C-alpha cells in the first residue's frame, strides 16, 4: 500500500476515534469513587494506569478525568488500528487530529504487542499518559520491570453498594426512616445481581448481559490472548469455578474432577482466568510460606451478577453471595490476596473467612454470616471466631451479616456484629 494511502487510512481511524471520544464525553455518568484526587493524579508526571475488569467504567473514568482538558485518544479495542499499527505515523497523526494536546488516553492498551516498551518510550519523551487495561498481567514481572516507578495505579471494580445507592438517589450513610424499606430491597438486589454499570439501570438485562460478558472474557481475554487450543476444558473450568465460588479448590482435585490432562494445565488455566479480573484466589493464612502454598485456596468471582448468570445451582446460597460481596469490598478497599488478605483454619478445623493483615500484624479477623437469628448458627460462628482469634492473638473481631447489628461478648472476647451496609 502506498505511503500516502497508509497515512490517509491511519488519519481516518484516528478521526473516527475522535468522534467516538466526543460522543462518549457527551453522555451523563455517575462519578465513581477512586482512591486518588483527580487533580493530584492529572498533575503528576507519572503514568496514570487505570486497571480492572472489562465494562466496569475504566474508559468512562478516564474520560471524566480528562473531559475539560485537551487530550488525544487512542482505543486499542480496534482491529483495524492494530493491523495497521505504525507507532511513528500514529504520533504524527495525533498532532494533526488533536493540535496542542496535553494528555494522551490509551484505552485497552494491552491489546498492542509490546505495549509497555512503547509506553515507556512515550514517557521518556515527556508525554502525559492515562492508560486503561483489562488485564492484571499488565503489572506482572515482565511488564512492571519496564514501568517500575513510572506509574500510579487506579484499580476499578463494578459499582460498590454505596455507588449503587447513589445511582438510585439514596445516601447509604444518611437514610431516612421512610427510605429504609427501599434501601433494604436495593441491598438485596445488589447482593443477588451485582454492580456492573451497564445493568444497574436495567435489571431485566442482567442475566443475558452478564452471560454474554462472561463468555466474552473467557473467549476473548483468555482463550484468544493465550492461544488456548482446548477451549472446552477452559470453559468447563470457568463454569466449575463460578458454581463453586467461596469454596476451597486445589489444582490437584480440579484436575481429577474435570478430567484434565495435567495439574500444570489446571494451574495455568486458573492463572489465565485471574488475569482479566474474573476470578480471585485466597490462600489459607500460615506463618510458614511452604504450608500456605500447599493448602487449598478459596475462589471468588469479581461480581455476584456472574453467579446469577452462569452458576449451576439448584438453590440460592445467600451466605456465599454475602461472603463474595464482602471479599470484593475488601479488594476495593485495597486489601491484596496473599499479602494482606487470607482465610484461616484453626487446629480444630474451625474457619475464619477473612484475615486482614497490616504490615506484620493481624489487623482484624472477619466472619461472614447472612442470618444469625438461630442460636445454633450464632454459637457456631462465634465459637469459630473466638478459637481462631486465640490462635492468631487478635482481639479485633467482626461478624458481617445481612442486617443484624449488635455486640457479642463471650470468653473475654468482644465481637462487633455489623450489617454489610455499615461494614
Image (spheres, helix red, strand yellow):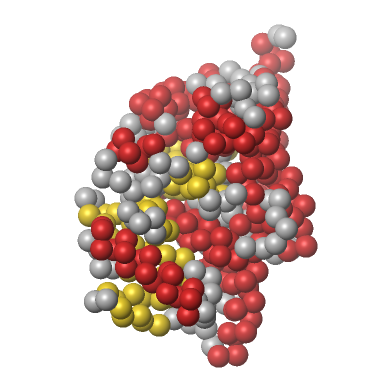
**Residue reaching furthest top?**
2
Q: Is residue 273 visible?
A: yes
Q: Residue at x 24, y 76 (%)?
A: 412
Q: Relative to residue 256, is residue 364 drawn left or right?
A: left
Q: Residue at x 62, y 36 (%)?
A: 257
Q: Is residue 27 visible?
A: no
Of residues 5 and 355, the one nearer the viewer is 355
Q: Residue at x 59, y 72 (%)?
A: 187
Number of numbered discs present?
Answer: 0
Q: Relative to residue 115, is residue 288 drawn left or right?
A: left
Q: Relative to residue 383, is residue 22 drawn left or right?
A: right
Residue 195 drawn above or below residue 420: above
Q: Where's the C terminus, which quadrant?
A: bottom left
The x, y position of residue 279, in whole percent, is: 55, 44
Of residues 39 and 321, the one nearer the viewer is 321
Residue 143 drawn above or below residue 41: above
Of residues 29 and 280, the one nearer the viewer is 280
Residue 121 drawn above or below residue 56: above
Q: Where's the N terminus, which quadrant?
A: top right
Q: Where is residue 72, by image quadrant? A: top right
Q: Residue at x 35, y 41 (%)?
A: 292
The x, y position of residue 22, in whole percent, is: 65, 47
**Residue reaching furthest bottom?**
177
Of residues 350 and 62, the one nearer the viewer is 350
The x, y position of residue 349, in whole percent, is: 39, 55
The x, y position of residue 39, in whole percent, is: 39, 54
Q: Relative to residue 67, is residue 186 drawn left or right?
A: right
Amino acid at each position: 500500500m502506498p505511503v500516502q494511502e497508509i497515512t490517509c487510512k491511519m488519519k481516518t481511524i484516528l478521526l473516527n476515534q475522535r468522534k467516538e471520544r466526543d460522543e462518549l464525553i457527551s453522555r451523563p455518568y455517575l462519578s465513581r469513587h477512586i482512591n486518588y484526587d483527580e487533580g493530584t493524579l492529572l498533575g503528576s508526571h507519572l503514568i496514570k494506569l487505570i486497571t480492572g475488569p472489562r465494562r466496569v467504567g475504566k474508559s468512562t473514568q478516564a474520560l471524566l478525568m480528562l473531559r475539560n482538558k485537551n487530550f488525544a485518544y487512542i482505543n486499542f479495542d480496534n482491529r483495524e488500528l492494530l493491523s495497521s499499527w505504525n507507532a511513528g505515523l500514529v504520533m504524527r497523526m495525533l498532532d494533526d487530529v488533536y493540535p496542542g494536546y496535553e494528555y494522551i488516553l490509551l484505552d485497552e492498551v494491552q491489546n498492542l504487542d509490546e505495549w509497555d516498551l512503547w509506553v515507556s518510550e512515550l514517557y521518556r519523551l515527556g508525554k502525559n499518559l492515562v492508560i486503561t487495561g483489562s488485564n492484571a498481567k499488565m503489572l506482572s514481572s515482565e511488564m512492571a520491570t519496564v514501568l517500575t516507578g513510572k506509574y500510579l495505579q487506579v484499580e476499578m471494580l463494578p459499582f460498590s453498594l454505596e455507588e449503587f445507592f447513589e445511582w438510585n438517589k439514596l445516601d447509604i450513610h444518611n437514610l431516612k426512616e421512610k427510605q429504609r424499606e427501599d434501601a433494604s430491597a436495593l441491598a438485596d438486589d445488589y447482593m443477588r445481581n451485582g454492580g456492573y454499570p451497564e445493568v444497574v439501570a436495567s435489571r431485566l438485562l442482567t442475566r443475558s448481559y452478564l452471560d454474554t460478558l462472561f463468555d466474552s472474557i473467557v473467549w476473548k481475554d483468555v482463550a484468544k490472548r493465550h492461544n488456548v487450543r482446548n477451549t472446552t476444558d477452559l470453559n468447563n473450568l470457568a463454569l466449575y469455578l463460578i458454581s463453586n465460588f467461596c469454596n476451597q479448590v486445589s489444582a490437584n482435585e480440579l484436575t481429577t474432577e474435570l478430567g484434565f490432562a495435567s495439574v500444570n494445565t489446571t494451574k495455568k488455566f486458573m492463572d489465565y482466568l485471574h488475569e482479566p479480573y474474573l476470578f480471585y484466589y485466597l490462600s489459607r493464612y500460615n506463618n510458614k510460606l511452604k504450608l500456605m502454598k500447599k493448602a487449598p485456596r478459596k475462589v471468588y468471582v469479581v461480581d455476584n451478577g456472574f453467579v446469577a448468570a452462569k452458576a449451576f445451582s439448584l438453590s440460592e446460597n445467600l451466605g456465599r453471595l454475602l461472603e463474595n460481596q464482602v471479599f470484593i469490598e475488601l479488594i476495593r478497599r485495597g486489601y491484596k490476596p496473599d499479602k494482606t488478605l487470607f482465610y484461616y483454619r484453626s487446629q480444630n478445623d474451625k474457619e475464619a473467612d477473612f484475615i486482614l493483615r497490616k504490615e506484620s500484624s493481624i489487623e482484624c479477623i472477619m466472619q461472614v454470616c447472612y442470618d444469625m437469628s438461630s442460636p445454633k448458627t450464632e454459637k457456631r460462628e462465634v465459637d469459630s471466631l473466638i478459637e481462631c482469634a486465640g490462635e492468631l492473638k487478635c482481639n479485633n473481631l467482626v461478624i458481617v451479616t445481612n442486617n443484624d447489628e449488635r455486640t457479642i461478648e463471650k470468653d473475654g472476647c468482644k465481637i462487633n456484629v455489623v450489617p454489610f451496609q455499615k461494614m
